[in-house]
Amino acid sequence: MTAFLGVEASLTGRRWTGPSVEAERLSEAMAQQTGLPLPLARLLAARGVAPEEAGRFLDPQIRDLLPDPRGLRDMERAARRFLDAVRARQRIAVFADYDVDGGASAALLLTWLRDMGLPATLYIPDRIDEGYGPNAPAMAGLAAEHDLIICVDCGTLSHDAIAAAEGADVLVLDHHLGGETLPPALAVVNPNRQDESGDLGHLCAAAVVFLMLVEANRQMREAGASGPDLMAMLDLVALATVADVAPLVGVNRALVRQGLKIMARRERIGLAALADVARLDRAPTAYHLGYVLGPRVNAGGRIGAPDLGARLLATADPHEAAALAERLEVLNAERREIENRVRDAALQQAEERGLDAPLVWAAGEGWHPGVVGIVAARLKEATHRPAIVIGLDGGIGKGSGRSVEGVDLGAAIQRLAGEGLLLKGGGHRMAAGLTVEGDRIEAAMARLADLLARQGAGAAGPRDLRIDTLLMPSAATPELLERIEAAGPFGQAAPAPRFAFAGMAITQCRRVGENHLKIGLSDGSGPALDGIAFGAFDGPLGPRLTEHGGRRFHLAGRLELNHWQGRTRVQLRLEDAAEA
């Protein structure tokens, strides 16, 4: 395919690619049949939306997309046992993972139970001392004091730990890849069990918990009773879905859209307090869930007390909410400092090893286990390859990985564990964790690279930049952006459209902050469009555009609304440029 605008090597060394002739034909037909703006029609056509489906796609309804909870194995049994515990006022414990998905899952249950007048115990393991998922001492201790233990976002592979919960029933509500056998729990509800179809494998754990509560409310209605308002809890499902990098397609897209509307009402005092300390002064978007709120909720599990995030999401006390939000803000700043040190070392090591392999990985002594996952995400974003980052301590490495679309990292990690190259490992398609002996890291990563290459990892050029369409600055209006936002929210498996602006003159260019670049761009026929390039001076964009010397450039990036001093304007979040 011919390079888009003839850009074979941009300022950052990337080749630009655009839509095919067939895609353009479909887009034009979509625009003619629906009356939608051509940029929006191109986006819908790229999503595989037929013209007759455009209206429903742009206004997705949960009632049309929510799957029947009873389609998942063990669901009716889990909801029945849950309700039995509620009616009998039994002692319930919630054992959750320490990330956003686990915290939101726990908060869903705690909120529902509180609305029913029943308190519950929250238990979240310490990342360093206890590791991921249920462990035998913790489960035995909980079983001694509780009648029912509900494991959320964990437990599918925890055979021994769940067996240790003698005297209590255990429910597992999870989404991580299951093994050949299930643990001895009363019910294991997981769309990624091996005996499931996989049709709902894209759900995060909070969505699975939400479906269980839907089933519980349904069983209550059938018995002539009513349960708590579940729609008001969709803010938690939305946060978990985006933060856990679940694909924003199908019901996930509808859940996040509705959840963002709920969140905008600021009725969950924990999230409102967190938005305030993060200085988020407008209704959140999916971007804010993934890059503003999510990391702060995660901060406790990464480097502080593991239950802080879940407690914040579940609390009904405004004073506790404010205190927890402030604590998480401090921890998040500490996490960024630690992350930056590990990221720089990991990137240097990965570059020395080579960034064109099917797998990018790095390992270092003393790297904090709470940041290896987020550093792996940074490596993945920089290279468009699956990435693994491992922190070593006492000859044992604990690592975390992030994958790219179309490559199932969790399955490959689980196979590696089955082959004995890892002490343990598991996860889901886009993220996974592992524990490995230090002297087996090289062999394990070589084998993992081979498994991922068979899935196509590394086949796409890491330097290809996909352009959706060409646009003129005068067409980049708030009205167009509002129409395009109707096709969102944008995120994993549903990226926001990337626009190119051809032959632009640089009307202003200045450095802002430590390493960002603010520019103005114009084609000479109308007002200039503002642009911002974050981190531009960490690479070639900042220096090259600052010294433009009057030359014209093709510019590429995503459009967004910039709210500043009471004004709202469209700006280009600049990602790349090439001399025209």
Image: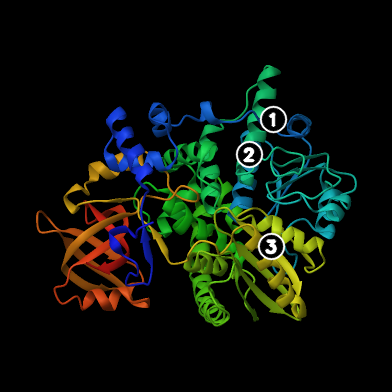
Looking at the rendered structure, which numbered label has been put on residue 451? 3
Q: Distance between the residues labelled 1 and 2?
A: 10 Å
Give SS at disc 2. loop
Q: From the image, state whether disc 3 or disc 1 is nearer to you.
A: 3
Q: N-terminal of the two: label 1 or label 2?
A: 1
Q: Mark 1 points at which residue?
A: 71
Looking at the rendered structure, which numbered label has been put on residue 200? 2
Amino acid beneath label 2: Leu
The answer to which of 187 and 199 lies nearer the viewer is 199
Q: Position of residue 532 (x, y in %)?
A: 28, 64
Q: Is residue 503 above or below residue 233?
A: below
Q: Which image quarter holds the C terminus? A: bottom left
Specify whether residue 98 is in view. Answer: no
Q: Position of residue 393 (x, y in %)?
A: 72, 79
Q: N-terminal of the two: label 2 or label 3?
A: 2
Q: From the image, state whether disc 2 or disc 3 is nearer to you.
A: 3
Number of callouts? 3
Q: Quadrant of residue 1?
A: bottom left
Amino acid beneath label 1: Gly
Q: Which residue is drawn at 45% across and 58% down?
A: 291
Q: Residues within 10 Å of mark 3 (few under 14, many from 20)?
A: many
Specify whether residue 458 is in view. Answer: yes
Q: Assess whether mark 2 and mark 1 are in contact (beta carbons under 8 angstroms).
A: yes
Q: Distance between the residues labelled 2 and 3?
A: 24 Å
Q: Residue at x 77, y 39 (%)?
A: 195
Give SS at disc 1. helix
Amino acid beneath label 3: Leu
Q: Which residue is drawn at 16% across and 72% down?
A: 551
Q: How crowded is mark 2: few (under 14 residues within 10 Å), some or many (20 or more)?
A: some
In the visual, does 82 lie left or right of 7? right
Q: Where is residue 89 in the image (x, y as percent from the top left)?
A: 76, 34
Q: In which quarter of the image is residue 505?
A: bottom left
